[in-house]
Image (spheres, grey):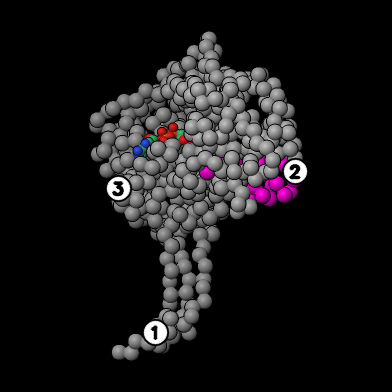
Amino acid sequence: MHNILESLQIRSLNPSFSTGLTWGTTQEREVKAIHSPIDGKLIASVCMASAEDYEQVVKQAQAAFVQWRNVPAPKRGEVVRQIGQELRLHKEMLGKLVTMEMGKILQEGLGEVQEMIDICDFAVGLSRQLHGFTMHSERADHRMYEQYHPLGIVGIISAFNFPVAVWSWNAMLAAVCGDVCIWKPSEKTPLTAIACQQIISKVLKENNVPEGVFSLIIGDARIGQQMAEDERVPLISATGSTRMGKQVAKAVAGRLGKSLLELGGNNAIIITPQANIESAVRATVFGAVGTCGQRCTTTRRLIVHADVYDQVKERLLQIYDRLPIGNPLQESTLVGPLIDKEAVKSFTQALEKVQQEGGKLLTGGNSLEGSAYISGTYVKPAIVEAENHYLTVQEETFAPILYLIRYEGSVENAIALQNGVRQGLSSAIFSTHLQETEAFLASSGSDCGIANVNIGTSGAEIGGAFGGEKETGGGRESGSDAWKFYMRRQTNTINYGKTMPLAQGIKFEI
Ligand code: NAD
């Protein structure tokens, strides 16, 4: 661990913020200790930034924007290409640090860094394709088209469970769009953020990128709130709980800014009698216990037809019985720890509550003890037979609890259950029957931002627009045309004739 921090030269730093090339240290020196969820040991301490530090970062970002917006987009893309290369070189180290600080298994830690590399590649291509439409004018000798201009400062607030990928989804797109960004990572995972900043600073220096294009500020909700209220930050992209999203949305709307919200999910897989049961079960297990149930796209509800219910239940119980839980750095481990003891408490409380509501705990639900689980953050993933309307089932508990829900009759009944929650992020159906899968994808089907067929709810590719509806916040980031939200759209009408006709045929003779 120490080797990684030293190799990245972050052990000797005591930063609370960075504007890209240099680091700054707060005067207030509120220090936060970061312990690994793997063994509870102290990894490092960081300084939390003050309101004055934030001011300094914003001023630098404003100055940088004036220069960066004039750099041709493909040249901005070239900087992002080099960032992608640098991330390739540091993939092993950064992936391991993600695992150590956040607790996801190493394969997922590496996968997260791969996602960063992929979005860099995507953004490089995008840097030559930031195009708008041309339209035919209703007036003679007129031309009409639209263009996209950089927006300004993008404030990025990220959650602990994807401590680095979410930043890159936003920052790389923002960078090619000509924006500058200020990243406030989760206060639970600041070290991976500092590592990223350290990795990219080499590229920024080599390319004479102005100080302030990629800024980082270490802090908690107070800095996030300050940023949300700041009218100098036209776009806030916030990833986290629905509770946080509602507060941020209110603050940003209060100043008529733009917010891109990526909030909680309550994702379901539907298994119909026409499903390939083995594929469905495999996808369910990965979705339910991967990242120890701490993905926004984690499978939380499994809606199974009565005809195959017992078969699915039995197969799941067999697999859950032998899930390798333990140190996420070990190759054989599939389930690592939860982020902290608070998360264990939420897990236990949700299980108590759902049983009070009538749910039946089928397996798991206990926290693990012993020398291998010394941090007190390891739990045995749970499966509970439940009904969709239970209050506990309606909520997102950020832990590995899978609610098994039975449905009868047609697929429409299953879809109604799947849609019967306040969140709308990811959804999936397992069926080989065309009419069932098309019903799920139709406008009367899944109401989520992501709807998959014969694929689980988690593990999205970066090429598509990512996000969800309802209490998930409505934002879309990453692929497709998500970049448009990071720019301002301008419609231009040009008169190259010698007269001045008005639109709609209006006569206005002077
Ligand atoms: P959280 O809401 O506790 O914190 C997320 C971030 O918001 C942190 O950086 C935190 O400091 C900041 N924050 C909290 N309150 C704030 C406020 N009032 N103003 C400004 N900033 C504030 O979430 P978490 O526990 O870190 O992450 C788990 C949650 O994130 C889950 O609900 C999960 O579903 C969600 N999530 C969603 C997505 C998605 O793309 N939809 C992705 C990852 C995580």
Residue linked to disc 1: 506
**Quick one: label 1 or label 3, which is nearer the N terminus?**
3
**Quick one: label 2 or label 3, which is nearer the N terminus?**
3
Residue linked to disc 2: 432
Q: CA distance from mark 2 to mark 1?
A: 58 Å
**Could you tell whether 231 is left or right of 387 in the image?**
left
Q: Amino acid at mark 2?
A: Thr
Residue linked to disc 3: 230
**Could you tell whether 215 is left or right of 465 in the image?**
left
Quarter holding the C terminus?
bottom left
Name which residue lies at 39% across and 84% down: 506
Q: Amino acid at mark 3?
A: Asp
Q: Is any part of residue 97 visible from this angle?
A: no
At numbered mark 3, what does the secondary structure look like: helix, strand or loop? loop
The span shown in magenta is 424-441
In reply to whether residue 427 is colored magenta, the answer given is: yes
- Picture layout, residue 469 above or below residue 146: above
Mark 3 burial class by Cα count in 10 Å: few <14, some 14-19, many 20+: some
Q: Residue furthest top?
A: 370
Q: Is any part of residue 507 visible from this angle?
A: yes
> Mark 2, mark 1: which one is toward the viewer?
2
